[in-house]
Amino acid sequence: MNNIKTELYPQAIRGGGKKSEAYKKARRALIAELISGVTGLLLAGFIFGHLILEGTMLFGKDLYEVVAYYMEHPLPLAQISAFSIGILFFVHFVYASRKIPARLYERKRMMEIGLSIKKAKKRWSQPKSDIMLRRHRETSLWIWQVRTGMIVLACGAFHLFLVTWNIFTDMGYADASGLTAKIASSRVESGLWILYLVLGISVVAHLAIGLYRLAVKWISDTWFNRRWAYLLCTVIFWFYVILCIAGVAALAGKLTLIEIPVGDLLIRS
Ligand code: HEM
């Protein structure tokens, strides 16, 4: 066996009623699984909408300005989202991170397995390794989900902090509090484009793999074929990766597809 002790390799325990420790442990694991799944699904829904709204910059900064304005007026949607997404982000991290190998040697082992699996052949042959490996898509996807999860945690927390600060204050240099095309572009142009590209590609990979794994766990191999789930998540991945790269280029002022006139909808400029 590979020494990594996560819930992915539970010990099989036979017997025991509803009061047994094994039953309680299994019940706790199921509840944690449901919470991490539901919060992950809600966050994926948020990111789908968020990247589309950010993508409005591709159709001109006036349209972006209109979207940014109506996210805050008359209903404080941005304020409510910043708060609720912050909580969801935290709860998802707490419940999903129980699967991340906690100890350093386990993490090292996971990296080793990740690299060996990449080199492994389709058949069971691994002459230079102490464990028998073969290429296995589900394992590689799980390893990538852990890797991208760590990046999203670090970069996403920083981004959430930054935009929440921007929504509620003038950050000491803007004309007023609130999201605007000018402030968003100035941030991206001044170097944050690197963070947004890394965060964007990681979050999209993380959510596409997450959706695939949710489908495999809860619905596929019933009425929904696992192969269709993989295909669907691959399409989602590429669509959002391209949208994200184009969106960052648009925010940096390097790309506009067409300028959509917004007329009277533009309240501030
Ligand atoms: C409600 C909370 C959030 C708000 C109000 C918000 C707002 C914004 C804003 C205004 C930008 C434009 C760049 C800037 O102004 O710095 C942006 C970009 C971006 N945000 Fe968020 N964000 C939120 C949550 C998140 C979360 C949780 C993630 C992922 C973990 C995320 C991922 C991104 C990415 C990848 C971009 C680049 C957009 C693109 O490529 O088109 N955001 N966000």
Image (cartoon, rainbow, N blue to C red):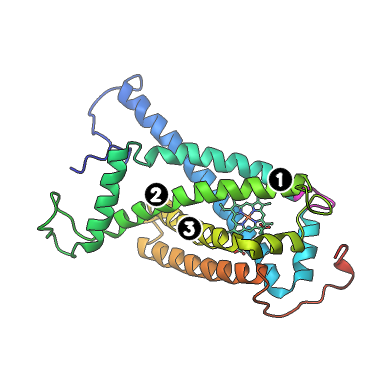
Which amino acid does the dot numbered 3 rest on?
Ser
Q: Position of residue 182 (x, y in %)?
A: 76, 63
User: Is ligand 1 closer than 8 angstroms to the Cβ of mark 1?
Assistant: no
Mark toward the start of the polypeptide (3 vs 2): 2
Q: Position of residue 253 (x, y in %)?
A: 68, 72
User: Is ligand 1 closer than 8 angstroms to the Cβ of mark 2?
Assistant: no
Which quadrant: the N terminus? Answer: top left
Q: Position of residue 5 (x, y in %)?
A: 28, 37
Q: Which residue is mark 3?
A: 202
Q: Are marks 3 and 1 in contact (CB under 8 Å)?
A: no
Circle 1: element type: helix
- In the displayed structure, 105 sits above or below 49; it is above
Which amino acid does the dot numbered 2 rest on?
Val
Q: Which mark is residue 165?
A: 1
Q: Which residues are magenta?
A: 72-77
Q: Which residue is mark 2?
A: 146
Mark toward the start of the polypeptide (2 vs 1): 2
Circle 3: element type: helix
Number of the front mark, 2 or 1 = 1
- Disc 3 versus disc 2: distance between alpha carbons? 11 Å
Q: Which mark is residue 144?
A: none
